[in-house]
Amino acid sequence: MSQTVDRALRILPLLAEGPANLEQVATRLDVHKSTALRLLRTLHEHGMVYRQEDQRYRLGARLFALAQQAMETLDVREIAHPHLLTLNEKIGHTIHLAVYEEGEVVYIDKVESRYPVRMYSRIGKPVAITVAAVAKLLLADLPEAERRSIAERLEYPKYTARSTPDAAAFLTELLRVRDQGWATDLGGHEESINCVGAPIRGADGRIAAAMSVSAPNVVVTADELLKLRPLILRTAEAISREYSGNTVSKDTP
Amino acid sequence: MSQTVDRALRILPLLAEGPANLEQVATRLDVHKSTALRLLRTLHEHGMVYRQEDQRYRLGARLFALAQQAMETLDVREIAHPHLLTLNEKIGHTIHLAVYEEGEVVYIDKVESRYPVRMYSRIGKPVAITVAAVAKLLLADLPEAERRSIAERLEYPKYTARSTPDAAAFLTELLRVRDQGWATDLGGHEESINCVGAPIRGADGRIAAAMSVSAPNVVVTADELLKLRPLILRTAEAISREYSGNTVSKDTP
DNA sequence: ATGCACGTTGCATATGTTGCAACGCGAAGG
DNA sequence: CCTTCGCGTTGCAACATATGCAACGTGCAT
């Protein structure tokens, strides 16, 4: 809608790939150098981009701070967090909380496993959308048309032999997940890691977020992990209940 | 420099405080509603803002993804990470990595403690700049004028009785840190938590990042933690050596 | 010294942005 | 049921502003 802002914003993902100099930015934006310079300067003033010693630009620290602050004001996250901690104290494994937003699924909270095993995931990181248990839950709840259109424009990377292979398989899986009310990822993202996920619903019954428990084979087998399902579902329901109370606004008593 | 982009960017911190509707945004920007609408639409198209069901706007998921991606391409972080993991395997405590950037200090990496104690900090979160060991190290290396000007415009919240009280005390502390080449935070941020930090230097000898080890009193006393200083300094030096090799560009062999 | 590669600046042009006023729409209230 | 209010949305004309150009700096290499 606004050409100038549009151009400025197109710079950000471009710099996210790695530092770039003025000319590279201008070329990729398809504008004159002087135009790119002025846009970068404005972004710089707001701390969105940073100019390193070699004069190249990269994304700035303000961006991190913004993302951080935004995450902390999310209602679901605040409500869910204590529940996730309690669950983690009981079972010890890694717990994730994720939301869906216009084509993307991102982790908004994570409680680390008490076992000395590291799992690569990070708050703010886009989820492996075709395989993650939380992603299946969140997408399964969308209207049919949207589900289909998303499924079709996704890519289906073969992380492992058990990754979702294509759109058809994905849509079938989503229907199954929708019916059973919970989801799994059994080695679909990383060979040795299994997850069990459960939905968190808002006052309108729609899925507002999803949580999952992940553990590597070396700690528990998939079967053992699945035994925790009732506990996980109960936690998700507890969060749903609390969240349904005050969905719309924080300050309604 | 560019009015339109400037206005659009001013919307972001405004929304970071919490959701707002069109009129509120327009008022706070001091522009006409229609102008605010067009800016918000453009931000929306880029996923920077999200419109929730009640029509109010809040920050969007793309912001998280961007911040995340940017962080992962930081050279220091990539180089330091394995060293931090090794150190963590030896001593078990929480380890942070932080950088300074135009007035802000942010954590760019964190390795969780192996002890079952949670510490509130998060990657991307702005550091408690007046007390944190990493912040002292990073600021201590700035030219005198800049150090002074920053110190003077900072606020000095009294997190605890041992927090840095004012600009004068802070500047003195910075000089001390600069001389000794390492820093501590002994209960200055949270009563029961102590930290020891060490600088990571680039090829030019300037401090490019800082790392710290944090542990609560219940796990180790401050004295015991300080005994780890040589080990921490050695780790920081190892990272510095490796980082000095390829500061400027990733692809110089 | 000379050339090259890039960043930077001033300026005239026209393009894109702005504020206005009017419209739409749902909620609240008589 | 109609009116009023609050808020988001749209089309348009006026003008501010972003744009590309060409020329100028500056550092680096030859």
Image (cartoon, coloured by chain):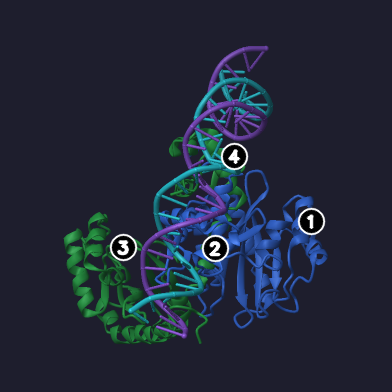
Chain colours: A green, B blue, C purple, D cyan
Q: Can you say whether B83 is above or below A92 in the image?
A: above
**Amino acid residing under circle 1:** Arg
Which chain letter goes with mark 2? B
Q: Nearer the viewer, mark 4 or mark 2?
A: 2
Q: Residues within 10 Å of mark 2 (few under 14, many from 20)?
A: many
Q: Are marks 3 and 2 on the same chain?
A: no
Measured in 3D between alpha carbons, the distance from the residue under mark 1 to the one under mark 4, in whole angstroms, is 26 Å
Q: Can the viewer see residue A65?
A: no
**Amino acid residing under circle 3:** Ile
Q: Pick whichever of labels 2 and 1 is earlier in the sequence.
A: 2
Measured in 3D between alpha carbons, the distance from the residue under mark 3 to the one under mark 4, in whole angstroms, is 37 Å
| Point 69% across, 70% down: residue | B185
Q: Can you tell which quarter of the image residue A129 is in?
A: bottom left
Residue A53, percent across and down? 62, 42
Residue A239, percent across and down? 40, 84
Residue A14, percent across and down? 45, 46
What is the secondary structure assignment of the residue under circle 4? loop
Judging by the rendered image, the residue that carries numbered circle 1 is B148
* Mark 1 vs 3: CB contact within 8 A: no
Judging by the rendered image, the residue that carries numbered circle 2 is B25
Q: Nearer the viewer, residue C15 or B63?
A: C15
* Mark 1 vs 4: CB contact within 8 A: no
In-image side of A97 versus B182 (left or right): left
Q: Nearer the viewer, mark 3 or mark 2?
A: 2
